[in-house]
Amino acid sequence: MCLCSQRSDPTQDAGMSAVRTEDAADGRSTANGGGVVCDERGVTVLRPTDLSEMLAAGTKEVHEKAENTEFVKDFLKGRIRKELFKLGHVALFFTYSALEEQMERNKEHPHLAALYFPHELHRRDALARDLRYFYGEGWQNQISISPATQRYVERIRQIGRDQPALLVAHAYTRYMGDLSGGQVLRKVAQRAMKLPPTGEGLNFYQFDSIHSAKAFKQLYRSRMNELELNALTKQKIVEEAVLAFQFNMEIFGELEEAGKTLQDDVLDAAPVHGEMQGDISQCPYYTTKMAASDGSSYICQMAMIVLKNPSGQVLLAAWIAALAGLAAWYLMGPAVTQ
């Protein structure tokens, strides 16, 4: 569940006002299918009135709110409940089904044609494969749309009928996020839920037809900036992007509420971060947790983890045997010396 992450793009992180794209065929700086959009230095200068810049600035506050929801923060820490992950995928399936249905319907619209990349971006079929993995062959009969997702879907369909240009906001928010922070979430989910390394259950995050996410995002933003939109329409697109974030936060809230009804044993074991290879002592989350408590509950949790591990059981048995031997020597020692 990732939203558009402007800050994950290096040009946004550094506060730069220019990006550069290269045409694979002849090396020219290009955008929108080969039209030259750079100055004599080969740099495309971005202005505050460019749609990509307006979206980055206009969604900054709501983006930060979305990132700080409990669901997202727990996800990033590796505390992923598989049942909630599955429900999140269900919400995404209905959302992308509606979005891609409307993009297909309006693919020749002048404000959408340049952003129509079904082969590269569409996620519905990938989500269907993931849901089949999680729910089995009859997955379609086991899922249902939630109230928050229903509101999101209804909005997408409404603007698809009445204001197609606003679909740009939803496509930008979802797809650019999938190509940015979504790749981080993929690794976290795979390790925390111990999913197969071959990618089952995580097809949503895999873009086989995009070889460079960074280059594709630059191309996508360039095409957005070349759309012939007046100032009012641009502002409406920004407002719609803010609304898209709000819809997603409502879904996160639903998932948080659903999580309260799950049993503790639905939680996977310990979260796994980065390249730690399961070394829990390297995890700042657990360090902070232990420091904030008296340590006893933490020690109990660690003991349970050790007991569940075969090598830990062997070490514990050896330790107990050593203690028993030491106790026998101590108790029998005086009797022998007498």
Image: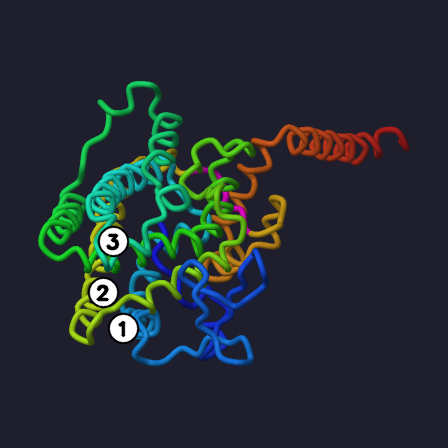
Disc ID at residue 103: none
Q: Residue at x 81, y 32 (%)?
A: 329
Residue span colored magenta: 268-273
Is residue 166 shown left or right of residue 39?
left
Which amino acid type is marked by label 1? Gly
Q: Residue at x 55, y 38 (%)?
A: 305
Q: At which x and y percent is residue 33?
A: 42, 58
Q: At which x and y percent is residue 204?
A: 40, 40
Q: Residue at x 37, y 28 (%)?
A: 134
Is residue 223 shown left or right of residue 236?
right
Which amino acid type is marked by label 3? Asn
Q: Pointer 3: residues within 10 angstroms few (<14), some, or many (20+)? A: many
- CA–CA distance in space, label 3 to label 2: 10 Å
Q: Is residue 40 above or below residue 12?
A: below
Disc ID at residue 58: 1
Secondary structure under the numbered disc 2 in the rendered image: helix
Q: At which x and y percent is residue 116?
A: 32, 50
- The residue that mark 3 highlights is 248
Disc 2 or 1, which lies upstream in sequence? 1
- State which quadrant residue 167 falls in: bottom left
Q: Is residue 233 above or below residue 109?
A: below
Disc ID at residue 242: 2
